[in-house]
Amino acid sequence: MADVLNRTAREIRDEVAGGTLSAVDVCGASLDRMDAVNPALNAFNHIARDRALERAGEIDRQRASGATLGPLAGVPIALKDNMCVKGMRTTASSRILDNFIPPYDATVVARLERAGAVIVAKTNCDEFAMGSSNENSAYGAVKNPWAADRTPGGSSGGSAAAVAARCVPLSLGSDTGGSIRQPGSFCGVVGFKPTYGRVSRYGLLAFASSLDQIGPFGRTAADAALALSVLAGPDGADATTATEPVPDYLAALTGDVKGIRIGVPRAFVSEGVDADVRRTFDEALETLRAAGATLVDVELPHAKYAIPVYYLVATAEASSNLARYDGVKYGYRSPHGKDSLKALYSRTRDEGFGPEVKRRIMLGTYVLSAGYYDAFYLKAQQVRTLLRRDYEKAFQKADVVAMPTSPMPPFKLGEKTDDPLQMYLADVFTVSANLTGAPGISIPCGFAAGRLPIGLQLTGRMFDESTLFRIADAYERLTDWHTQSPVI
Amino acid sequence: MYTAAAGWCLPRLNNSIAAGASAECDNYTAIHVRFGFRTPQSEAQLIVKYEPVIGLEIHAQLRTRTKIFCGCSTAFGAPPNSQVCPTCLGLPGALPVLNRQAVDFAIKAALALGCAVQPESIFARKNYFYPDLPKGYQISQYEKPLALGGAVEVTAAGKTTQIGLTRIHMEEDAGKSLHEGFFDSDRNTYVDYNRSGVPLIEIVSEPDMRSAAEAAEFFTHLREVLVSIGVNDGNMEEGSLRCDANVSVRPAGQAKFGTKAEVKNVNSFRYLQKAIEYEITRQIEVLEEGGRVMQETRLWDSSTGRTHSMRSKEEAHDYRYFPEPDLPPLVVDTARIEAVRATMPELPEARRRRFVAAYALPEYDAGVLTQSSELADYYEQVARDSGNPKAASNWVMGELLRTINDRGMNIADVPLTPAALAGLVALVDKGTISSSIAKDVFGKMFDSGRSADDIVAADGLAQNSDEAALLAIVHDVMGKNADAVTQYRAGKNQTFGFLVGQVMKGSGGKANPKLANELLKRELNR
């Protein structure tokens, strides 16, 4: 039964719907695989065995009764532990929410379950999605399935590792500055960040509201497209969702890239990039060019400011978003805060939050403070507008912009934990898409020495996810990187 | 015990919070003693020497059925934490969605007060920690509010002044911290989040008021407008209308404003004027003693009639406002503004003028009758149906309002319909019953819903205008009161009143007074 986990989500769904595969069997295989690899990977905060088997049984019963099954019927899926599932512990990998059980479902959860998906686990991540290595989790770092001494990337490291390790064909992550694409790259899987507003954030524990976006991991572009077609679309519970019609993403997978113009910001990607990353990037572009795509030079003159802008905007919003974790209503409350209200707050938050979260709350609080707001927050928003214009200009010449997802292959656990700035620079190629709102994808495009996965990132026009899926799918047909799997 | 409906939220706080609150109360020890003047100047002289400058910030709850960012009910008085959901409890991952009705009400208020509704306004987060603020920030509007400008004309002490409005912005209310009333209130504070997310508008005035009376008049006028257009219920006891006052004083003739103090917690009409007066006197006293007024926030305490320092300028919060990323800018187009304008009822001021002109009512009557649009509507129907606007006014202002006030009722809950009251007025006009009988009939009609005709017929209350019958009573009275008759005939006219009274009494109160008068006079002079 274990080989069922080598199938794609589409294959599983079709077999479950066709009656040749039982959802309970698929679910059982997934649960067993998670149990088997988790001691080595630490990818899961919570494995929802009983609930998952019950849901899978329900899918099988629906099929038996002749009901029409949803587009993800029987597909096991793991969710990053920052999305609310009613009755299922949701922690954001933070001590402050160690005991939190949401009384409601996130919109993405409701949509997945309506489509027949079976939620099997909540995945480990950086605390409140803040990090690029998954080392900021209250439950310990996730290990990279390709190299146990390496980071799986972050912050959605557990979700990426779960797909790479063949525990699930699909998982969800959230991407605020690269938190889907970068771990996708590090774990050798497809990671997709939709356009801001494409997927509802209702029920996603907010890190930076104007940047956060939920998206899927899969082993193929087609599976990611299938998942997004279930997740996408306006939601009355999230006022920032877009009313833009959702196209048929699967129909966009023509296998053809002829005439596609791929913009390459040569100047921007020339500095500080690892040699293996540069090599695989150039090879991937050559493969696409040979298949009929055109490579064009684009310029992103303000992209070099993206990291500082990002760390001003994201920390400012985070400082406010995380104010609700105060020990009053839910979550952790310090037993040492009984002297005063101030003590209750400061002890609870001091003991409940990890160091990186506290660093960002302090940065963000400073950024918004009287006298600094104009110089930092407002200035950052102005640069954000300039960056958006850079991309608009680039998209006049090109259909997508290509960059390495990360300037380096997966680095060693502990390698950057003492130097936050070095850690922040790992996001240099991904944060722009969050600041502009554009959709982005990371697809496996090769390996560095030691079989360390490397990803190619494509960024598209606002709401043009289809072109990204189309190129990624075509690239998969030309290469076999996405078929390779780690030995755990 | 106050617990949340679903059991996953425990808004019961531990001892620390009660302790924290009492720590804040330590600031209250810096209480100023009132009227400790050491100079021989009188209070009146000092008020002349200094000019007060007052601006108000008024929070008005919008009368929507549901909260501003979620679908929870806004009904007052429900069991604690029974009208809550993930959004108004600030649960992880919950998001706000703006209530359209709240926006329309806010627009309506802005139009009624002559403000310019902005084509685009922006919600902002006001960040501060407090247990009754579940998200750790309040969603409000800051740099770009819903409406700007506007003015209100106020008459106080015979002087009419234009009071400018700075802005109107929308925001959500916080929950309610309960520090008292529980067996363990010495150690614990309880929080009720039913009020969390109730829609408010904040109306900010310019510092255009120069006396406490003027400020009270301004507030009264504002309340009248908000209530009459149906966006606020005017209920200060339930907290649906609240007022903070910015008060400063400056030497008369000085152009520059003095340092202001913000007076909070003024939760009734009665106290607004008192609190401002107290604060003016306090500040004058500080200056007279050679001191400086500190910029601070002060709390009004109605039990002592004083204001106490709550926090100084140095302790003031830095609210770290920034645009709310969970809500897109609020765009209001002309069509929407016009649609709201079309629902605008006649404003109290205009209606008052019309009542004076159309119904020939005294200014005073028109003022009383236009206190609320419900009352004014009621009156207009009585006036129209009875065809006697002045009599209608007397009934509505007299018996009706007295009964309502005695019973603490709202006009909307009165069982007596305007049409029925008009019927009563008509019976008096026709002479079917006397005014005094009519008052009894009113009492019987008020609760029963029966018509005046019914009651008059059933109880045999119609006036006796039967000349022969009345004449018999007159003769009977004259026979029994021969002394009085003699005195009257000797020129002592005062006894006439006594004799009329006896005739009325003899008729059981039903004699047509006019006829009884005529007959008695005729027989006495015979």
Image (cartoon, coloured by chain):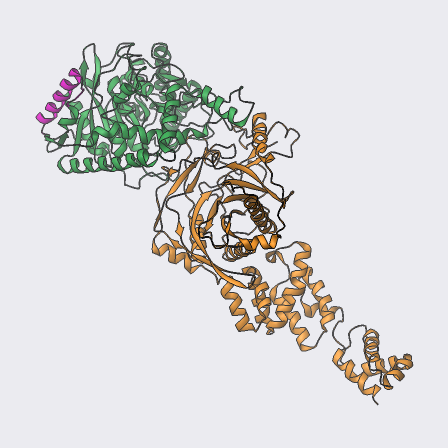
Is residue B189 among the parts visible in the rendering? no
B238 falls in the magenta region: no
Is residue B33 among the parts visible in the rendering? yes
For image coordinates 49% across by 65% down, the residue present is B350
Residue situated in front as seen by the camera: A228 or A313: A313
For this view, does B272 lie left or right of residue A2? right
Residue B482 against residue A123 in the figure, above or below: below
Residue situated in front as seen by the camera: A325 or B385: A325
Residue A43 x %, y %: 35, 16
For this view, does B63 lie left or right of residue A165? right
Q: Chain A hue?
A: green
Residue B488 against residue B7 in the figure, above or below: below
Q: Chain B hue?
A: orange
Residues shaded magenta: A270-292
Residue A186 against residue B71 in the figure, above or below: above
Residue A186 against residue B41 in the figure, above or below: above
Residue A337 x %, y %: 53, 22
